[in-house]
Amino acid sequence: MGRVFLALFGLAVVLPLQAADPAGTAAGQPAAVPVRTAVPNEPPKAAVAARKQPGQVTQAVFTTSIQNLEPANSISTLTNNHRHIYFFTDLRHMTGQTITHRWVYKGKVMAEVKFQVGGPRWRVYSRKTLDPAWLGEWQASVVDASGITLGVSTFEYAAAAKPPAAPAARPAQGAAAPVAPRSSQ
């Protein structure tokens, strides 16, 4: 029984070597043994060539408008007398990828806008219509197709200052205030 086990064990060790170099072993030559010639801690050259250059978000800002494919301004606070806001992103080295602008308010996803990146530098924006009652912090994220967040920006949606009430007209001193006539029925 021990000899059968050793014979089977020997085949299990030889088979992987034959699979590594089927042409050499078929000709009766010894199987090729890989020799490591790379510098320690250096990745193999094939792995380096296969690595993609990572994409990046070079700009992610909120703005009140877009002019000539650029944000008109960069804001961190917007008052609720404004109903629209834009989230602008400048993406690099992400050609062919799908990215998403994810708008979040109070922990709830309020909108997701997907874009297909068409070049090595791609500028995109999404627009959100805001309800004046949605006061507080808003967040917009740039998310890739695998769900990884590449960038996050926030802005505060604040109540607009109310203009002071116009003072009530006061009658001149000593004059009686006019009384509105009443109709009798």
Image (tube, grey):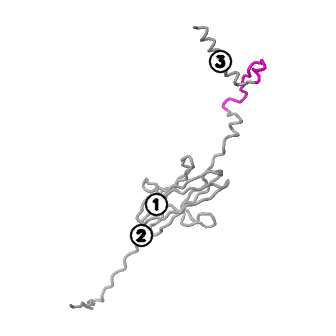
Q: Position of residue 79 (x, y in %)?
A: 46, 66
Magenta span of residues: 23-41
Residues 43 and 124: in front is 124
Quadrant where the image shows the N terminus:
top right
Query: Earlier along the polypeptide chain: callout 2 or callout 3?
Result: 3
- 10 Å crowding of disc 3: few (<14), some (14-19), many (20+): few
Residues 160 and 69: in front is 69
- Which numbered tag is attached to residue 156? 1
- 10 Å crowding of disc 1: few (<14), some (14-19), many (20+): some
- Which numbered tag is attached to residue 127? none
Report which residue position mark 3 lands on.
Answer: 13
Where 137 falls versus 147 (above or below)?
below
- Magenta includes 29? yes
Q: Position of residue 29 (x, y in %)?
A: 77, 18
Residue type of the residue flagged with mark 2 = Ala
Q: CA distance from mark 2 to mark 3?
A: 81 Å
Query: Earlier along the polypeptide chain: callout 1 or callout 3?
Result: 3
Q: Secondary structure at mark 2?
A: loop
Horizontally, is 22 left or right of 134 in the view? Answer: right
Report which residue position mark 2 lands on.
Answer: 161
Q: Residue at x 71, y 36 (%)?
A: 46
Q: CA distance from mark 1 to mark 3?
A: 66 Å
